[in-house]
Image (tube, grey):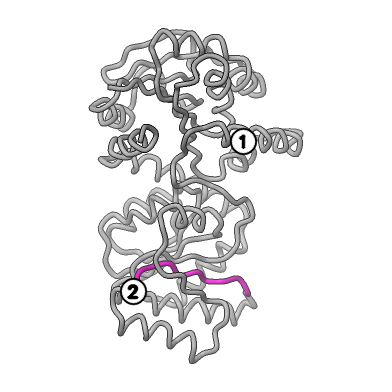
């Protein structure tokens, strides 16, 4: 089995939570798992399914990040050499800087993955009161460009565009997905609120009669800000999610919608019907605004509320990302890493 290291400031604590333990249990079936992160003191603990090296956290926030991201190279190098680390997963492009230096100057065969979920930089800056945001953002952007060039791969669902605009639907174009409801009520919202951004519809035509009905609504009403893009690759879907304000759904039935998890991994909030499978956990834990199924007034009210409230947008971005990372660790997390490693060594 390959030795896999997760590098980032994720808070695990001396004892792992049930969800973290399950996540590492999954991955440990196929990898020897290691972590370097902050702790209350410098120590290495061999948990049941993962070995974690805790780096003592400095008191000042600015000192914490400067140390972990820039001054921790020697500790990092020694740990990787002693444990024969073969694959390094950096939490974000900034955390990838030391791994990239390690690859360049110490071990050129190591593989680096950047797990860039959501708008990591803006979320970081908005979560805390940080001075000199502009120069910090400028420096971070330059580092990100460097680490992206040096890494071997990065997860598909990530933030790639800081200028979010447009509303997005992703899913098969079939009756139970309520695409006709979305089209009609999005258009009504645009007319009432002078909203000119687009509704982008991504999905496979699996019901020709229903697809023609949806297209006819657009054409017969001369709607010019709704665009059908057809079926797209996972990479293309990620790019659209990352660049959109909000994902919208009108399903009458769902299990556990993967698209809401993928949306959350891109830091993209959602607006969806309050049905079983969506209401819990996405509505109850945050990240998704709910409206009563087929209720046009609630749909338009919630969409207007979202678009007019910057604080709400930031809050939902953070909640959607947090929930998506939790859910993506169930069953699919280990398989995702198997696919990633296979791609790295193909």
**Residue, x 29% and y 35% (percent of image)?**
334
- Label 2: how many residues lie within 10 Å, few (<14), some (14-19) or many (20+)? some
Does residue 47 lie above or below 138 as drawn?
above
Is label 2 in a helix, a strand or a loop?
loop
Disc ID at residue 205 = 2
**Residue, x 47% and y 61% (percent of image)?**
247
Is label 1 in a helix, a strand or a loop?
helix
- Label 1: how many residues lie within 10 Å, few (<14), some (14-19) or many (20+)? some
Does residue 79 lie above or below 120 as drawn?
above
**Residue, x 51% and y 90% (percent of image)?**
221
Which residues fall within the magenta stretch? 196-204
- Disc 2 to disc 1, how far (Cα)? 38 Å
Q: Nearer the viewer, residue 299 or 46?
A: 46
Q: Position of residue 71 (x, y in %)?
A: 62, 15
Looking at the rendering, in which quadrant would you find the N terminus?
Answer: top left
Residue at the disc numbered 1 = 144
Left or right: 179, with 7 as reference point: left
């Amino acid at each position: 089995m390959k030795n896999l290291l997760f590098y980032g400031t994720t808070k695990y604590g001396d004892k792992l939570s049930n969800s973290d333990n399950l996540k590492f249990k999954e991955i440990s079936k196929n990898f020897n798992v290691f972590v370097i992160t902050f702790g209350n003191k410098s120590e290495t603990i061999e948990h049941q399914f993962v070995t974690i090296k805790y780096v003592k956290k400095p008191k000042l926030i600015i000192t914490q990040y400067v140390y972990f991201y820039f001054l921790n190279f020697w500790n990092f190098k020694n740990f990787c050499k002693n444990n024969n680390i073969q694959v390094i997963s950096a939490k974000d492009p900034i955390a990838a800087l030391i791994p990239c230096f390690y690859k360049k100057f110490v071990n050129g065969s190591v593989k680096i993955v950047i797990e860039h979920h959501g708008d990591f930089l803006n979320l970081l800056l908005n979560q805390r009161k940080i001075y000199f945001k502009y120069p910090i953002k400028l420096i971070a952007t330059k580092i990100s460009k460097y680490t992206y060039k040096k890494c071997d791969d990065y997860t598909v669902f990530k933030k790639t565009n800081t200028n979010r605009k447009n509303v997005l639907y992703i899913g098969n174009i079939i009756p139970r997905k309520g695409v006709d409801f979305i089209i009609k009520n999005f258009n009504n919202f645009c007319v009432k609120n002078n909203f000119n951004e687009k509704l982008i519809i991504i999905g496979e035509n699996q019901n020709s009669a229903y697809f023609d009905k949806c297209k006819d609504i657009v054409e017969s009403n001369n709607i010019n800000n709704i665009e059908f893009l057809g079926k797209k690759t996972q990479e293309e879907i990620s790019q659209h999610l990352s660049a959109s304000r909000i994902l919208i759904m009108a399903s009458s039935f769902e299990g556990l919608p993967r698209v809401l998890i993928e949306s959350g991994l891109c830091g993209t909030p959602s607006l969806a019907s309050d049905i079983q499978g969506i209401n819990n956990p996405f509505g109850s834990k945050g990240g998704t605004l709910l409206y009563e199924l087929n209720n046009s007034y609630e749909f338009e009210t919630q969409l207007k509320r979202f678009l007019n409230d910057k604080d709400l947008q930031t809050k939902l971005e953070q909640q959607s990302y947090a929930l998506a990372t939790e859910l993506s660790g169930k069953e699919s997390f280990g398989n995702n890493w198997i696919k990633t490693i296979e791609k790295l060594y193909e």
